[in-house]
Amino acid sequence: MGSPPSHHQVGGHHVKEDFAVRGNEPKDEVQIYTWMDATLRELTHRVKEVAQAAKKRKEKLSFAFVYLDKNGHFVVKGVGMTNSFGNGRRIDDGKTLKDLGFQQTNVQWCDPTNM
């Protein structure tokens, strides 16, 4: 099973309104194919492969799920944070998508140091 598109945003997460119009989602999409047992640390490495801003030594990456709620409204839910060059000591590094309750098709990360 492949995972969802991943959007990245320097300075903060996209707001839910950025996803409101199908086909007009944020243009900074990164495709990451993974499994439910992927950890945020593993996703951090994948993001760093394609996003230059995530490669900085002291960067922090904040992850969020973007999904439709039961009323059809988009929700952006923060689920964890990692350091770009972590060593597994950050609490969220070992959390898997399954642990975090991932069910939908969109994961988002941002660089909160620029917020």
Image (tube, rainbow, N blue to C red):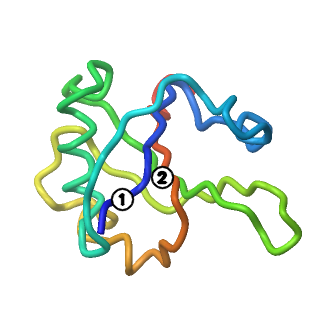
| Residue at image location 27% in from the left, 53% down from the top | 33
- Name the residue furthest front: 23
Of residues 85 and 106, which is closer to you in this image? 106
| Residue at image location 24% in from the left, 38% down from the top | 84
Q: Secondary structure at mark 2?
A: strand
| Res. 106 mark | none
**Image height of 109 relative to 80, above or below:** above
Figure label count: 2
Q: Is residue 94 left or right of residue 14?
A: left
Position of the C terminus by quadrant: top right
Badge 2 or badge 1: first in the primary sequence = 1
Residue 2, percent from left and from top: 31, 61
Of residues 103 and 89, which is closer to you in this image? 103
Residue 74, percent from left and from top: 76, 54
Q: Dot 1 surroundings within 10 Å: few (below 14), some, or many (20 or more)?
A: some
Residue 20, percent from left and from top: 79, 41
Q: Is residue 33 left or right of residue 17?
A: left
Of discs 2 and 1, which sits in the foreground?
A: 1
| Residue at image location 48% in from the left, 24% down from the top | 28
| Res. 3 mark | 1
Residue 32, percent from left and from top: 30, 46
Position of the N terminus by quadrant: bottom left
Q: Is residue 107 left or right of residue 91?
A: right
Q: Secondary structure at mark 1?
A: loop
**Image height of 18 relative to 72, above or below:** above
Going by the numbered disc 1, the residue's amino acid type is Ser
Image-quadrant location for residue 35: bottom left
**Disc 2 versus disc 1: distance between alpha carbons?**
9 Å
Q: Are marks 2 and 1 in contact (CB under 8 Å)?
A: yes
Going by the numbered disc 2, the residue's amino acid type is Val
Read off the residue under disc 2. Answer: 107
- Name the residue furthest right: 71
